């Protein structure tokens, strides 16, 4: 009986520890910032790929992501390859998600 109790109490402690790790993995990190040149935007998968310091970073966005150009909100489809972007993002589990995408320089001529 005592052995069974020790086993059960160990299982409960282990389960609680695993639950804590899973919860921590879902928690967001402190906001980060990346600045780079837009290589691609995928509106279906809701991702942008930017080149920064020679590396390609893939960053997700969602309906809560604020996307701005010249102080005005724009749709993701407005972003063009070659645009210079400043992206504020946070990590959600294994995923990097943009909270704000700002076009700081565009490849398109001013309208």
Image (cartoon, rainbow, N blue to C red):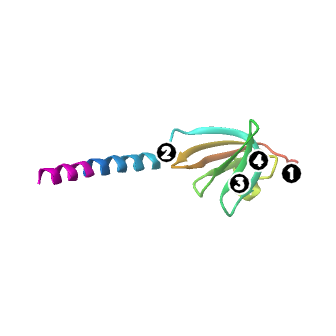
Instruction: Say few, some or many: other residues with alpha carbon within 10 Å of mark 4 (under 14 / 14 to 19 / 20 or more).
Output: many
Residue found at the very far left of the displayed protein: 1
The residue identified by callout 3 is 74
Q: Residue furthest top?
A: 53
Label 1 – label 4 distance at C-alpha = 20 Å
Q: Quadrant of residue 75?
A: bottom right
Residue at x 57% of width, y 54% of height:
64
Q: Nearer the viewer, residue 37 or 103?
A: 37
Q: Secondary structure at mark 1?
A: loop
- Camera-near label (1 vs 4) is 4
Where does the image place residue 102, in percent across and percent down from the top left?
69, 44
Residue 98 location, x and y as percent? 61, 48
Q: Quadrant of residue 45?
A: bottom right
Of labels 2 and 1, the one closer to you: 2
Callout 2 secondary element: loop
Locate residue 101 relative to residue 1 in the image: left or right: right
Q: Nearer the viewer, mark 2 or mark 3?
A: 2
Q: Residue at x 52, y 38 (%)?
A: 30
Sequence-earlier tag: 2 or 3: 2
Q: CA distance from mark 1 to mark 3?
A: 15 Å
Closer to us: 106 or 32: 32
Q: Residue 87 — which label?
A: none
Residue at disc 4, secondary structure: strand
Residue 73: x %, y % from top left: 68, 52
Calculate the distance from the C-alpha at mark 2 to the C-alpha at mark 3: 25 Å
Residue underneath mark 4: 38
The residue that disc 1 covers is: 111
SS at badge 3: loop
Write down the region rendered in magenta. Answer: 1-11
The residue at the point 40 percent across, 46 percent down is 21
Tell me where residue 99 appears, x and y as whole percent: 59, 47
């Amino acid at each position: 009986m005592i052995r069974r109790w020790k086993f059960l109490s160990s299982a409960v402690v282990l389960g609680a520890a695993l639950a804590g790790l899973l919860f921590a993995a879902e928690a967001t990190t402190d906001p980060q910032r990346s600045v780079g040149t837009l290589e691609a935007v995928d509106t279906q998968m809701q991702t942008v790929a930017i080149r920064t310091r020679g590396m390609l970073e893939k960053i997700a966005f969602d309906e809560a992501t604020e996307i701005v150009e010249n102080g005005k909100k724009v749709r993701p489809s407005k972003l063009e390859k070659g645009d210079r972007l400043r992206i504020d993002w946070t990590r959600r589990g294994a995923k990097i998600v943009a909270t704000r995408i700002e076009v700081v320089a565009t490849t398109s001529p001013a309208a």
